[in-house]
Each structure stands twice: as structure tokens, then as C-alpha cells.
Image (cartoon, helix red, strand yellow):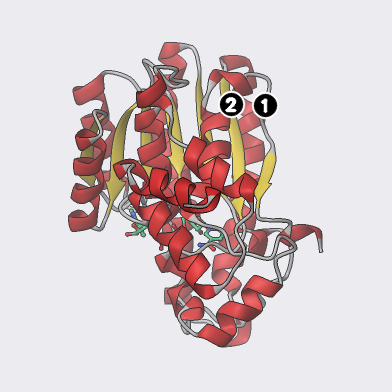
Amino acid sequence: MNESCKTMVRLESRADHAAATKSSLEYQRRGESISHNLLSAIVGAGQGLETGFMRLSGKVAVVTGAAVGLGRAVAGRYAREGAAVVVADTNVSDGAVAVEQIRKEGGRGIFVGADVGKECDVGRLFEAAGAEFGRVDVLYNNAAVLLYGRDVRAHELSMEVWEQVMRVNLGGAFLCSKYAIPFMLKQGGGSIINVGSPTGLNGCAPDLTAYSTSKAGIFGLTRVMAAAYARDGIRVNSLIPGTMDTPMNEYALSNEETREEYRKAVPMGRLGMPCDVEGLALFLASDEASYCTGGLYTCDGGLTVV
Ligand SMILES: NC(=O)c1ccc[n+]([C@@H]2O[C@H](COP(=O)([O-])OP(=O)(O)OC[C@H]3O[C@@H](n4cnc5c(N)ncnc54)[C@H](O)[C@@H]3O)[C@@H](O)[C@H]2O)c1
């Protein structure tokens, strides 16, 4: 058995990385190259429970939009690094499966069905977090919608779509922060991570007026909250994924030609997988990032440098 096959077998033996493995195999099937470093990163990802070295021990993390995609990967990683995780999502069935997976791996987690754009849901979400775990140290504001086909150029965009996207993508991050911050103030600190997008940095998605604007707003929210709470020990940063292979992008990536175009546009020559954001999400949540606030951190295979 050659080295890369051995690595794949090791990957397959890890239940916590079943999804990553599936994606990796899928990449190989497609002939998209996976570097040794990437494989090592995947194998090395999520060591916490196995090695005993956990970077989020004693912390409680709320991860929104964690039923599938990037949020699910991050919630799993946080749990493997010792955090008790509150998985929040409107997708009840996949959210429950995500928590089941966390528990199966020996982690602690609960699921709360909540629409982050609705204040009553968000209030209930943080009430549940407080009741179950007594604190909130990390808020990973990840939930978002991309309304492909309805989110269009400004002169054709309906107010309804604009409001829906703003309510969830930007309003959700604001509302969850609003309810998480009192916990953090009481505890003397915390970390908020707002998930942005390259579309909020430049005009790379001219058809997605509302989505791109909501993500630009995420950067504003990140900076203003970073400044407002810096002396309270609350750090606020943005994580900016590139083109990731998740349900959000299915509308584009399910078409082989479009997929290939997207892949070629990435300097690293491959699309991102959910596990790719775990390391940065973990770093920003952990005390290792104790002097980092107000930052916008890309995790995009170089997409935004070209
Ligand atoms: N996939 C990419 O290429 C990409 C690129 C840049 C940024 N992002 C950002 O990364 C984050 C995660 O993206 P993804 O690709 O995993 O998305 P996804 O669509 O695959 O998953 C999003 C999750 O959020 C949940 N959600 C949607 N609306 C919600 C609401 N109102 N309340 C609670 N949960 C809600 C969904 O049910 C789903 O589980 C998003 O903020 C997205 O904008 C993604």
C-alpha cells in the first residue's frame, strides 16, 4: 500500500472525519490534486479528544448554522478540542445528527432550533446555552443564506429578498452577539467570530447584491464590536472562507464545467473543504489568539490575492 493510500485508510478509520474523507476521496476521483500538506492537515485535524491536548477545554461555544457545511465542521472541531457546543440551526434534522455525532465522539453538545434572524429565537438560544452549560465563551456567527437566482443586480432585486438576506446574514450576527456579549462581560472575556466572504471585500459576485452587501456589513460589525469591547476582553474577528464545497454552493458546483472554472480560479488549484476552515476557526476561538481582535482572516487558497 503506498503512503497516500495508508493515509486515506487512517482517515477512513476516523469517524470524526468521515465527511472530510468522503470529500477527499471525491477530490481524488475528480483528479483534483491533494497535496501532502493537505492530507497531513486533515489527518492532524481534530486531534483533541485523541491526544488529550485540547485547546478549548472548559469553554462553551455557540455555533450558528451548524447543521451542515462549514458550521458543522467547526462545531465538531470545537467539541473535539474540549468545548461544550451549542449547535443552532433552522435545519432541525441535520442539526440533531450533528449533535449526535459530537456525542458519539465523546464530546458535549446540544441542538437548539433557532432562526438567527428572529430575536425571540436568539433569546431562547442563549437561554438554553446558559441553562445547559452556564456560560458562553465563543460565538461562531456562521449562519447565512445565499438566495441564488433571487439575489440579483440592484435594479432587479426585490426588497423582500434584500430584507431576508440582511435579516439572516447580518441581523443574525448582530442579534447573536447582542445576546452572547452579556455572558462574556460577566465572565471577563470571550471570542466572537463572524464569518465573512470574499464577496464582501470586492465585487467578485456582482449578481449577489444582498449577499455581498451583508458580508461587507459583517466586516463593519466585526470592527465596531472589536473596538467597543477590546477593554472587556472580548475579541471579535472575521473568518473569510473562499470557494468551499458545501451545500450553499451546490447551485454552482453541481455543474462540472462551472466547478472546474471555480477550481481553476483558486491559486491553490482546489476548492476548499469544510475541514479547511477548522484550524483558523479554532485558533481565533482559543486563547492562542489573545492579542487578535478586529482582524479579517482569509482561508481561501489564495482566492482574494488574485
Ligand atoms: N461555501 C462557500 O463557498 C462560502 C464562501 C464564503 C463564505 N461562506 C460563508 O460561510 C458560512 C457557512 O457557509 P456554508 O457554505 O457552510 O453554508 P451552507 O448553506 O452549506 O450551511 C449554512 C447553514 O446555515 C443554516 N441557516 C440558514 N439560515 C439560517 C437561519 N436563519 N438561522 C439559523 N441557521 C440558518 C442552514 O440551515 C445551514 O445549516 C456562511 O456564512 C457563508 O456565507 C461560505
Q: Which residue is mark 2?
A: 235
Amino acid, disc 2: Arg
Q: Position of residue 229 (x, y in %)?
A: 59, 24
Q: Nearer the viewer, residue 50 or 76?
A: 50
Quadrant hosting residue 99: top left
Q: Position of residue 53 (x, y in %)?
A: 45, 17
Residue 167 seen in render:
no
Q: Residue at x 63, y 74 (%)?
A: 262
| 285 lies left or right of 56 | right
Amino acid, disc 1: Cys
Q: Which residue is mark 1?
A: 292
Q: How far apart in space, not on screen, are marks 1 and 2 (Cα)?
A: 7 Å
Residue 89 seen in render:
yes
Q: Quadrant of the C terminus?
A: bottom right
**Picture quadrant of ligand 1:** bottom left
Q: Position of residue 84 (x, y in %)?
A: 30, 26
Q: Residue at x 49, y 64 (%)?
A: 245
Q: Residue at x 24, y 33 (%)?
A: 109
Judge the density around disc 2: few (<14), some (14-19), many (≥20) Cα neighbours within 10 Å.
Answer: many
Quadrant hosting residue 289: top right
Q: Position of residue 301 (x, y in %)?
A: 68, 56
Q: Nearer the viewer, residue 164 or 253?
A: 253
Q: Residue at x 20, y 24 (%)?
A: 132
Relative to residue 297, is residue 54 depicted above or below? above
Q: Residue pushed farthest right? A: 306
| 134 lies left or right of 55 | left
Q: Which mark is residue 73?
A: none
- Whether pointer 1 and pointer 2 mark residues with C-beta atoms closer than 8 Å, the reply is yes
Q: Give the secondary structure at mark 2.
A: strand
